[in-house]
Each structure stands twice: as structure tokens, then as C-alpha cells.
Image: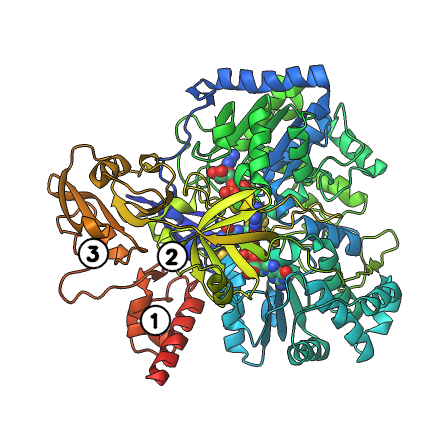
């Protein structure tokens, strides 16, 4: 039994992992302060994602297996030659909030101190950069003032651009439990889209896209008019109040809300002292993300509602170590321990501490600009670790072209099955979650250990060790001679003491003397951790980290017009059970049962205007490319808006990378891409046939050139959704090639004249694959067919024989309960449905969906 931390989101849940015959048994850690034993569906399925089938287990050079010595010779040698010929700014590192703090520390020390370049940025630029900029602008440092406990102690919680129910499910569970315990508590949800999070909202505000800055500008003006500004606090601790108020009044901008909704929000926020405003990517990923963060913080500063129990702004971070990355200075415009590259005193101190030969004096390029420099040839060698930019950066088509043209691309990943890895000259195998060892920091500043539970597979190495070897090969061996992550951590903690002496908030100097054994045993701890203080909130005492100790309110002019262009505004984001580009969550069949296909949420009016039928395929075109997605016609989105998930890539679908549609537009302050407001058009894709397949082997969609496809793990094998424009003459041949079954025994039924075919292939009497073709979207009980893989039964009926009811699409991933079973169980409440079917009783991530199904059922019965 090993205590460790979940691999996924920034909630940072403690996990207890126990090796078991079929992988790992996973439970929530009852003693971890982030989750107190809770887990969500993704965390609970971690044990199913640690298999080695798709792992990269040895280095590769130009597509061929290589030794570590050969691969590092090529990679480090290429970096050394490039630096020698073209200087340190001709190479770059692009890293990730999924690295451990120790990995992140080492690569930053190498780039900024020893290569001497600020060409190091991270995928956190796409994620947290606007918050970092907003915090620094307001507080003088990138400090998260509050704690998770504030969500439970608040009287009003406002969620802005955060689908907490799906993206931070355990925080959502904590909020739900707090609300159940204190029914007077109110939750406001601000999102242009109706989401699973809407279920908890007393006030569900369908704000206009980008209307959040206007909403909080109006709130500031209203606070003033209502006499709710804390004048004494502002006088003592805040600068810039008048300018901020003037700007808010001068150009409040449009919120898109009705007067009644707006009034209800203003009045609730104004009259409630204990209010927490949580914000997510709907705020950050905008061309005015930093201003929106400022608009939110302004309201908390004006009322002094910050850093005290139950109040304050709370940015929920995305990745497991988004915060650790900020602490080590992972961004191209930050330096270790919340220091700044452009402050000479900070630079000198860090340089002296590292005994570093070089240190850039200016900030480096932010992610989008970094890849533009790869494209224009200024950067000639790039080292990419723990992120998949060919899928996740905006303008992904141009990013891929830039990498294709780059003379040296090194990719350090746990799998070669990524769109970025395919573009690498050198591929280096890294240890994955469950094998690696180090620390992460979550959204409320809690540092916890990720510990190895499994032995290192193949030739994979720890990320920090790979960076240290690169350093040695570049001639900096002595400064990177680490014996293990504990030594790196101690150095980082010691540096934080130096930083604290310069006024930094990030101080964990009390951990600088941890022995290896104490590091191994380290219990979750909130920073700061100094001799004098451990954890707690910041700023409740009115002391901020600016030179004069006063917070800054920033004037925000909200009145921007919506960007013009193609008729639909594409919003992009996440689904409950997948993680980013699916390289890990995609391995768990039960996680794919929730959503197995890329889709486009489009309003019924917009669909009708374009002849787009439900469940048909749509072709979406944007600034830099096109995508093929399944149409999900729904009024969850507003007319004129559309939504698509970010998870699908060339590995999982034909053409579903939504970043190809998103132009590289960024916030002028933070450089964060505006990933939620691409202008696109959608048109019906006139498919002549639709198909659904299951197979034991990984399906090969090349068998049907030009077709739409999306593949996912299911039960014992794979499922594939397909559609095509061109008629297929030989379905048997196509099926055999697709399913990898050249000589399996076939049984078939169908009506060829009507374009209907049902083909089942057996090996040794067991079902090895099946294909169902129809001229309209295939109606079939998919879970039933998938369950027959490897079994003796016949799938050709497409539905269970006799009285076995179809469970419908899986809602509860933990216990495998489907929507039909929930609707039919006769329950009226989520609790009763849980008692009847088990759904929602394990991790609880699906409770919002269960509530929605029960509500729909009640409406149906009322109408009968
Ligand atoms: N299941 C799952 N959970 C995850 C992740 C994952 O991949 N899968 N990734 C993790 C990571 S790295 C991150 S950063 C977080 C992200 O967590 P969230 O920020 O909660 O997730 P998103 O789905 O990107 O976007 C949140 C919401 O912003 C809304 N939105 C779009 N435009 C606007 C706007 O103009 N105003 C407002 N108010 N809202 C808007 C969208 O409709 C969406 O519902 O999730 C983390 N958790
Ligand atoms: N359109 C649009 N684009 C977006 C977003 C959006 O909402 N809309 N969200 C943005 C946000 S918030 C984020 S955080 C990014 C996420 O985007 P990415 O970071 O590109 O996505 P991941 O799939 O998490 O990529 C992680 C990679 O690291 C590998 N990996 C996993 N563990 C390890 C390890 O221990 N070591 C190493 N070396 N590799 C490992 C995985 O196999 C995978 O290839 O996407 C951003 N892009
Ligand atoms: S909420 Fe879920 S995904 Fe996030 S850390 Fe906890 S268990 Fe992992
Ligand atoms: Mo993120």
C-alpha cells in the first residue's frame, strides 16, 4: 500500500495504491486534506491506465530503436552544436504542468542558468497564464490567497467559466456536501453553456461569451452605489480604487443577462460577506483573460473580502502540478520561487545560488510565440517534455508544420502514440505516473508526494534524470549531479529561503533540511513552510507583496465588441472522463464508456438552418483547418455558439483536433491563447454510410481511406464509429482490413440493396470483431455488442436476446450503470436512484447527470 497523489487535475487528491493481480487497486486517501478519501471517476480508474501496451519503453532515433547513449548523443549533441553555432536563443524547451516539481526545477535551472536562455515555456501558458498575470498585477506576486476550506465556509460561491462538476469533481463533491449541510448556502454558475455544474446552481447565468469582465465591472460599480465598498480597508491596503471604479462605470460592456438575472447576482454578491469567486478556463482562455481576472479580484479588494475564512478569489488550477510549475518559475517570464527574470536583484540572487554561468535578462517568448520562432527558423532545436503541442496549441496545423521543418525535435514522453511524438527526431522514454517519484502542488498550495508504486518499465527514466543527463552532456555536470528527487527538492526549498529574503511569498525553507527518509515520508503540507509559519491564508492582514505593501486594483474597460468573422463561435473544453489528448485516460475502457466520440454541441436553430441532423457528421471549418465531429443538437449552447471537446487527436479520430480550428489569438498581457472563442462555420457532411465496429485488435482506419472514424477502448477490445462519403463495394474486405481479421470465420446478415450489412467474425468460436453498416447513423445497443467480444454469443441481432434491458450510454463509470437503467429505476432523487441501481454511490462524478436524467423523466411522466 502506497500513499500517492492522483495523476490528473489540480484538485490534487490523495490516493492509496495497492498492487493487485490486474494492475493497481486505487482508493481515496482518507487523510489527504484535498479529498478526505473522495475520488472522481478518473482517479478511481487510475489502476486501469498503468498497463504497458502503448508505452514507449526505449529511446528511438529517426523511428528506429536506439540506446540511451545514441539517443542522448544525438539530442544533446544537436543542442550543443546548435548553441555553439547560433547562440543559446536558437534552442528551446517546451514543458508541462504535469511534470513533477523536481523535474520542472531541473529543466528551468538548466535553461535559464546554464544554457542561458529564457526560451523555456510550458503548457501552463495555455492554462493559467492569465491568472498568474492577474495575481502578479494585483498582489505583487502569483499568490493564491485562500484554501479549499473557503468553499465550505462561504455563504455564496460564484463559479465563473468553470465546469467544476466535470473538471474538478472532488471540489464539486465538497461543495455539494457543504451545500447539503447548510442549505442556506447559494451557488451561482456563470457560463454561456449549460453544463453538469448548472445542476448545483441556485442562479445559473448564461453570460454572453466574454461578458464576464462586464459582469464584474458592473458589480464593482454596484458595490460602490450600494455602499458595500469597505472604505477603511481600501484606504489602508489598496491602491487604484478610483481609476478602477471610473473605468468600470465608463465602459461597463454587455453581459448578455436579463435585468432580473443581473440584479439578482449583484444583490446576492453585494449583501453576502462570505463570498468566494472561483474561476476557470472560461476566464483565463480569452483575449482579455488577464483583465477578467483583474475585474474579479477588484471586487474582492474593494470589499476586503480576501484571505479570510469563506472569502476570496480562487483560481482552480488544471494540471496536477500547474502550481509547482509556477513555483519553480516554469514560464518564460518568471524565475524560480516566484521571482522575476527582469528584476536585477532577483537575477543576481538566483544566479549566485546556482553558481550559474549565464542568465538571460529579458523574458522569453510565450508558447505561441515560441512556436512562431520555430516556424521562422530562429529556434532550430526544441525539447518537448510531457505535453502534446501538436494537439493542444492553437493553430495546430501551423504548429505541426513548424515542427516538421525544425532541424531537431526531441520529445520526452511515456508513449510514442501521440501526434507530437510522430514528429520527433529523437524520442526519449519517461517514467509515468505510478513509477515516478517527487512532489506536486495543488490549487490550494498543498505540496504532496507522488510516489512510485510500480517498478520502472523497460529503459524509461525519470524526467529530472533525463534533464540532468542533458546538462552533463552540455558540460554542466557538477551543478546537476543529483542522486535523487529528494536532493533536488532540498535545493529548491533552500532557494526559496533566498527568495523569501527578497520578499517572495513562496517560502518552504523549513523543508530544506529534509533527510531522504523524511522526504519519502512527507505528509501533504500547505506552503508557506517556514520556521515561523505553516500554511494558512494570505492577505487577510491587508499586507500584499508589492513594494508599498498595498494591493493594486487595475482599471478594466469591459466594453469590447464580439470579434467578427464566421457565424458560429466555437467554445472548446473538457468532458468528464477524458484527460486532454487521452494518452492515459483513453486506456481505461470504463472512461471511454461515458463519451466515446468527438462531438459538436450545436443549437437546434443553427442545426436546422444548416440541415444538420442529430447524430450526423458535421464538418467544422475555422481559421487554420477543418474537423469532422458528431452533431449533438442541443439547447445547452446558446444560438450562435457551439462547443467541442479538446480530447481527440490523430491517434483517436480521423480529423477531430479542435485546435486546428482555433486561431493563435492571445491575451496581450499573459500571452494565453483565446481557446474558447474561435469563429467557425459548420456544414452537414453528406455521409453515404455510417458504421459501428467492435474488435479485439486495434482497428486500422486506413482500411477505409477518407472515412470519418473515432476509436476507443471498450471491454476486452476496441469500438470504432465510422462514416464515409464514398460507396464501399466490398464490405467484407474492408471489415477484415479494418478489424485485422484476414482469415476469421464470417457470418453475415443484411440487405445490400438498402445499404445494410451486419458482419460478425469469429476465431475459435469466440467473437473477434463485428461491423454494422447502415445508410443512417447506426442504431444499436453498443454496450451489448461490445460485451460479446471474446464470447460465444451472436451480435447480429444488435440487441440483447430475451428480456435483458439495454442499459443505455454509461452514466456511472464506476459501477457501469447506464442512462436507461437510471431513467427506469423509478427513483425521484439521486439518493434513491443510487440505492436502486448503485449509480452515483462511488465517486459521485455522475450525480449531476443522474439528476438531469431524473428531472427529464419526471417531465416525461408529467406529459403522459
Ligand atoms: N475531466 C477532465 N478534467 C480536467 C481536465 C481534463 O482534461 N478532463 N483538465 C484539467 C485542466 S488542465 C484544466 S485547465 C481544467 C479546466 O477546467 P475548466 O475551466 O472548468 O474546464 P473547461 O471545460 O475548459 O472550461 C470551463 C467552462 O468555461 C466555459 N466558457 C467558455 N467561454 C466562456 C466565457 O466567455 N465566460 C464564461 N464565464 N465561461 C466560458 C465553457 O463553456 C466551459 O463550461 O480542468 C482540469 N480537469
Ligand atoms: N482549444 C483548446 N486548446 C486547449 C485547451 C482548451 O480548453 N481548448 N486547454 C489547454 C490547457 S488548459 C491545457 S493544460 C493543455 C493540455 O495539453 P497537453 O499538455 O498537450 O495535453 P496532454 O494530453 O496532457 O499531454 C501530456 C503529454 O505528456 C505525456 N506524459 C504523461 N505523463 C508523463 C510523464 O510523466 N513524463 C513525460 N515526459 N510525459 C508524460 C502524455 O503521454 C502526453 O503526450 O491544452 C490546452 N489546449
Ligand atoms: S478530482 Fe478526480 S482527477 Fe482531480 S485529482 Fe481528484 S481524483 Fe484526480
Ligand atoms: Mo490546463
Is the CB atom of the residue marked by disc 2 within 8 angstroms of ligand 1's nearest atom?
Answer: no
Residues at marks 3 and 2 touching, judged by CB atoms closer than 8 Å: no
Report which residue position mark 1 lands on: 834
| Residue 471 locus on image (x, y percent) | 63, 23
Residues 3 and 301: in front is 301
Tell me which label, 3 or 2, sits earlier in the chain.
Answer: 2
Quarter of the view holding residue 308? bottom right
Q: Residues within 10 Å of mark 1 (few under 14, many from 20)?
A: many
Asked which secondary structure carries label 2, the reply is loop
Q: Residue at x 66, y 45 (%)?
A: 326
Asked which secondary structure carries label 1, the reply is helix
Does residue 829 show up?
yes
Report which residue position mark 3 lands on: 798
Asked which secondary structure carries label 3, the reply is loop
Q: CA distance from mark 1 to mark 2?
A: 18 Å
Tell me which label, 3 or 1, sits earlier in the chain.
Answer: 3
Q: Residue at x 72, y 63 (%)?
A: 213
Residues at marks 1 and 2 touching, judged by CB atoms closer than 8 Å: no
| Residue 408 locus on image (x, y percent) | 58, 22
Which is in the foreground here, disc 3 or disc 2? 3
Quarter of the view holding residue 212? bottom right
Q: Quadrant of the C terminus?
A: bottom left
Q: Residue at x 72, y 25 (%)?
A: 89
**Residue found at the very far front of the displayed protein:** 753
Which is in the foreground here, disc 3 or disc 1? 3
- Please give left or right for residue 411 compared with residue 531 in the image: left
Vertical position of residue 328 compared to residue 308: above or below: above
Report which residue position mark 2 lands on: 594
Residues 843 and 187: in front is 187
| Residue 623 locus on image (x, y percent) | 60, 45
Tell me which label, 1 or 2, sits earlier in the chain.
Answer: 2
Amino acid at each position: 500500500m502506497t500513499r500517492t497523489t492522483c495523476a490528473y487535475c489540480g484538485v490534487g487528491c490523495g490516493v492509496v495504491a495497492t498492487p493487485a493481480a490486474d494492475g493497481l487497486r486505487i482508493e481515496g486517501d482518507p487523510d489527504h486534506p484535498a479529498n478526505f478519501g473522495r475520488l472522481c471517476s478518473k482517479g478511481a480508474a487510475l489502476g486501469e491506465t498503468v498497463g504497458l501496451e502503448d508505452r514507449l519503453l526505449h529511446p528511438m532515433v529517426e523511428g528506429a530503436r536506439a540506446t540511451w547513449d545514441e539517443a542522448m548523443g544525438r539530442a544533446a549533441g544537436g543542442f550543443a552544436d546548435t548553441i555553439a553555432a547560433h547562440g543559446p536563443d536558437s534552442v528551446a524547451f517546451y514543458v508541462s504542468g504535469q511534470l513533477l516539481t523536481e523535474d520542472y526545477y531541473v529543466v528551468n535551472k538548466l535553461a535559464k542558468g546554464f544554457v542561458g536562455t529564457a526560451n523555456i515555456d510550458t503548457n501552463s501558458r495555455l492554462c493559467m497564464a492569465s491568472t498568474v498575470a492577474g495575481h502578479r498585477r494585483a498582489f505583487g506576486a502569483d499568490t493564491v490567497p485562500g484554501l479549499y476550506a473557503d468553499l465550505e465556509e462561504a455563504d455564496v460561491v460564484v463559479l465563473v467559466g468553470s465546469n467544476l462538476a466535470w473538471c474538478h469533481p472532488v471540489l464539486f463533491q465538497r461543495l455539494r456536501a457543504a451545500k447539503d449541510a447548510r442549505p442556506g448556502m447559494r451557488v451561482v454558475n456563470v457560463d454561456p453553456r449549460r453544463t453538469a455544474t448548472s445542476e448545483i446552481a441556485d442562479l445559473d447565468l448564461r453570460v454572453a461569451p466574454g461578458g464576464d469582465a462586464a459582469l464584474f465591472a458592473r458589480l464593482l460599480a454596484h458595490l460602490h452605489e450600494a455602499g458595500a465598498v469597505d472604505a477603511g480597508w481600501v484606504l489602508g491596503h489598496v491602491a487604484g480604487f478610483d481609476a478602477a471604479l471610473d473605468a468600470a462605470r465608463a465602459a461597463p460592456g454587455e453581459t448578455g443577462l436579463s435585468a432580473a438575472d443581473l440584479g439578482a447576482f449583484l444583490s446576492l454578491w453585494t449583501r453576502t460577506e462570505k463570498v468566494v469567486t472561483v474561476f476557470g478556463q472560461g476566464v483565463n482562455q480569452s483575449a482579455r483573460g488577464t483583465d477578467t481576472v483583474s475585474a474579479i479580484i477588484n471586487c474582492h479588494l474593494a470589499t476586503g473580502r480576501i484571505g479570510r475564512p469563506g472569502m476570496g478569489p480562487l483560481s482552480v488550477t488544471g494540471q496536477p502540478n500547474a502550481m509547482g510549475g509556477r513555483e519553480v518559475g516554469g514560464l518564460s517570464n518568471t524565475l524560480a520561487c516566484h521571482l522575476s527574470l527582469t528584476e536585477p536583484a532577483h537575477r543576481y540572487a538566483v544566479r549566485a545560488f546556482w553558481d550559474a554561468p549565464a542568465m538571460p535578462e529579458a523574458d522569453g517568448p510565450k508558447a505561441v510565440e515560441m512556436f512562431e520562432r520555430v516556424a521562422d527558423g530562429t529556434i532550430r532545436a526544441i525539447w518537448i517534455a510531457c505535453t502534446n503541442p501538436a494537439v493542444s496549441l492553437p493553430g495546430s496545423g501551423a504548429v505541426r508544420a513548424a515542427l516538421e521543418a525544425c532541424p531537431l525535435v526531441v520529445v520526452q514522453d511515456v508513449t510514442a502514440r501521440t501526434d507530437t511524438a510522430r514528429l520527433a527526431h529523437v524520442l526519449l522514454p519517461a517514467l509515468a505516473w505510478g513509477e515516478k517519484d517527487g512532489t506536486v502542488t495543488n490549487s490550494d498550495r498543498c505540496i504532496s508526494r507522488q510516489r512510485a508504486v510500480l517498478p520502472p518499465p523497460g529503459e524509461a527514466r525519470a524526467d529530472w534524470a533525463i534533464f540532468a543527463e542533458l546538462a552533463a552532456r552540455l558540460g554542466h555536470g557538477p551543478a546537476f549531479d543529483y542522486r535523487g528527487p529528494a536532493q533536488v527538492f532540498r535545493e529548491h526549498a533552500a532557494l526559496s529561503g533566498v527568495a523569501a529574503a527578497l520578499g517572495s511569498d513562496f517560502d518552504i525553507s523549513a523543508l530544506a533540511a529534509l533527510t531522504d527518509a523524511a522526504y519519502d515520508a512527507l505528509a501533504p503540507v500547505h506552503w508557506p513552510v517556514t520556521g515561523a509559519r505553516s500554511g494558512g491564508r494570505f492577505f487577510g492582514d491587508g499586507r500584499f507583496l508589492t513594494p508599498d505593501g498595498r494591493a493594486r486594483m487595475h482599471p478594466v474597460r469591459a466594453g469590447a465588441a464580439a470579434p467578427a468573422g464566421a457565424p458560429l463561435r466555437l467554445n472548446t473544453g473538457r468532458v468528464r472522463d477524458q484527460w486532454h489528448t487521452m494518452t492515459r485516460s483513453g486506456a481505461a475502457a470504463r472512461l471511454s464508456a461515458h463519451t466515446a466520440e468527438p462531438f459538436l454541441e450545436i443549437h437546434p436553430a443553427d442545426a436546422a438552418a444548416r440541415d444538420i441532423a442529430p447524430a450526423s457528421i458535421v464538418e467544422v471549418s475555422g481559421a487554420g483547418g477543418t474537423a469532422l465531429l458528431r452533431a449533438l443538437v442541443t439547447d445547452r449552447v446558446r444560438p450562435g455558439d457551439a462547443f467541442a471537446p479538446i480530447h481527440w487527436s490523430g491517434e483517436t479520430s480521423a480529423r477531430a483536433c479542435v485546435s486546428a480550428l482555433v486561431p493563435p489569438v492571445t491575451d496581450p498581457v499573459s500571452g494565453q491563447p483565446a481557446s474558447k472563442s474561435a469563429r467557425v462555420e459548420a456544414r452537414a457532411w453528406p455521409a453515404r454510410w455510417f458504421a459501428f465496429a467492435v474488435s479485439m485488435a486495434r482497428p486500422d482506419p486506413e482500411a477505409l481511406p477518407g472515412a470519418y472514424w473515432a476509436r476507443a477502448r471498450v471491454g476486452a477490445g476496441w469500438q470504432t464509429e465510422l462514416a464515409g462519403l464514398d460507396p464501399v463495394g466490398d464490405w467484407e474486405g474492408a471489415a477484415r482490413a479494418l478489424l485485422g481479421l484476414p482469415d476469421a470465420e464470417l457470418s453475415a446478415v443484411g440487405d445490400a440493396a438498402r445499404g445494410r450489412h451486419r458482419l460478425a467474425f469469429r476465431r475459435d468460436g469466440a467473437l473477434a470483431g463485428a461491423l454494422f453498416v447502415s445508410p443512417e447513423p447506426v442504431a444499436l445497443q453498443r454496450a451489448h455488442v461490445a460485451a460479446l467480444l471474446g464470447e460465444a454469443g451472436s451480435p447480429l441481432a444488435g440487441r440483447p436476446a430475451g428480456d435483458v434491458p439495454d442499459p443505455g450510454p454509461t452514466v456511472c463509470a464506476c459501477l457501469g450503470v447506464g442512462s436507461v437503467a437510471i431513467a427506469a429505476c423509478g427513483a425521484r432523487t439521486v439518493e434513491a436512484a443510487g440505492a436502486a441501481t448503485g449509480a452515483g454511490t462511488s465517486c459521485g462524478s455522475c450525480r449531476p447527470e443522474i439528476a438531469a436524467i431524473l428531472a427529464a423523466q419526471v417531465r416525461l411522466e408529467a406529459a403522459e
